[in-house]
Amino acid sequence: MAGTVSHPSVRSDRFNAIGSAAVEPASVEAVRRVLESVAWGIGLSDKLKIALYYGLRVASGVMRRDHDFIGRMHPEFWIGDVTVRSPIGYFACRGRTVDFDIVNPNYEAIEVERFRDRLLSATGEDLVCLDIGAHVGKFGVLAGRLLRGRGTVLAFEPEPNSFAVLQRNLGLNRLGNVEAFNLACGDFDGPAFLSRSMTKNIGGHTLRPIREAEQIPVMVRTLDRFLPEQKVDHVDVMKLDVEGKEADVLRGARGTLEANPQVTVFFEETGDPRTAESILFLQRLGFNVVRLAGNIWVADRSG
C-alpha cells in the first residue's frame, strides 16, 4: 500500500537560520539565544570566541546593510577552535568552519525536537539508530546520550577530517554505545569519489560528481549488506543527511526498510516532493512522508 505525503506548516523556512531557528535578527529572542550560546563555552577563551563571532556577524550585517545576517554562515569569523557544552552534549568545533553553527540546537531545531521525541518514546532495551552523514556528531551524540543503557548508534561519515572530529566528540561525551564508521552509504558496495564542499558549509561534501571540487576516494556500502556484517538485525530510527544522495542510501537499505515496520526515517530533500525520488521510494514502501520544515522530512508507517 502506497504511503502519503503532506506538508504541514510547522514553522517558517527560517527554522534553518544558523543559530536562530525562525527568530527575527533584531528580536529579544535572538539576543537571548546569542547569550545562551556564549554561555555554552567551556572556558573563558571559548566564551570570548563565541561572543566575538556573533559580534562580528552583527557588525558585518550593519556594514553591509544585510538584515539577514543572523541567518548566514560566516566561518571566517571563527578565529579559533572552541569546545562547548550545549543541551545536546559536548562538542569540539573547528575554527574557520561552521561546526558550531551546525551543532547549535537552534539550527534545524524542529528536527532535533522530533528526533529526540522519537528516541524517548521508543520502547525496548535493544534499540538501534543510524546516523548517516554524521558530520561532527550532532545527531549521533544526541542519540547516544538518549539511548545510553538501552540502545546503540551507528554513525557514518566518509570525509576524513569531519570523521576525526566526530570521533573526538564521541569521546568527549564518553559514548561507548556509539560506533563510528569512516564510510559512505549508498546503493552499491565499492570505492567512489567524494566531492569536497566548495562552499562555506564544509559539511556539504557529496558523492555527486562536481567537476571543480577536490575529489577524495571513499568506500561506499549498502546498509542491507553492511548491517548484517555488524550483527545488526533491526533498525528503529534512521537520520539521513547526505547532500542529495538520500535516494541512493534508501535504495541500498530497501530490505532493511521492508523488514522494520517500526522504523522512522528523518531525511533531507530539496526537490519537488511530487517527483523527488527519495519521497516516492518511501511512499512505495508504505511510508507516510511529512515535511517538518524547509528541506527536512520524516517518514514512518504510523496510521
Image (cartoon, rainbow, N blue to C red):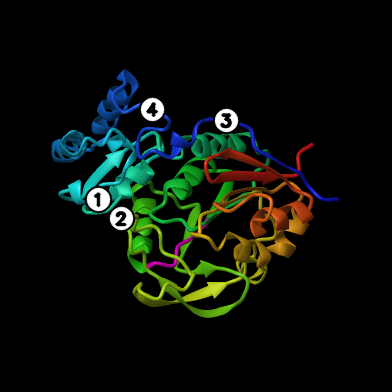
Q: Earlier in the sequence, mark 1 or mark 4?
A: 4
The circle drawn on residue 207 is none
Q: Which percent across, then down, holds residue 30?
A: 32, 26
Q: Vertically, is 252 above or below 169?
A: below
Separation of marks 1 and 4 at Cα, in angstroms: 20 Å
Q: CA distance from mark 3 to mark 4?
A: 14 Å
Which residue occupies the extreme bottom position in the image? 191
Q: Amino acid at mark 1?
A: Pro
Marks 1 and 2, how far apart at CA: 7 Å
Q: Callout 1 environment at 10 Å: few (<14), some (14 to 19), or many (20+)?
A: some
Q: Which mark is residue 10?
A: 3
Q: Are marks 1 and 2 in contact (CB under 8 Å)?
A: yes
Q: Which residue is mark 2?
A: 200
Q: Which residues are magenta?
A: 154-159
Which of the two discs, 1 and 2, labels the residue nearer the N terminus?
Answer: 1
Q: Which mark is residue 23?
A: 4
| Mark 4 Cα-neighbour bin, 10 Å: few <14, some 14–19, many ≥20 | many
Report the amino acid beneath label 4. Val
The quarter of the picture where residue 21 lies is top left
Q: Is residue 158 shown left or right of residue 60? A: right
Image quadrant of residue 217? bottom left
154 versus 19 height, above or below: below
Q: Secondary structure at mark 2?
A: loop
Q: Please, what is the three-letter code of the amino acid marked with disc 3?
A: Val
Which residue carries the number 1 mark?
Answer: 75
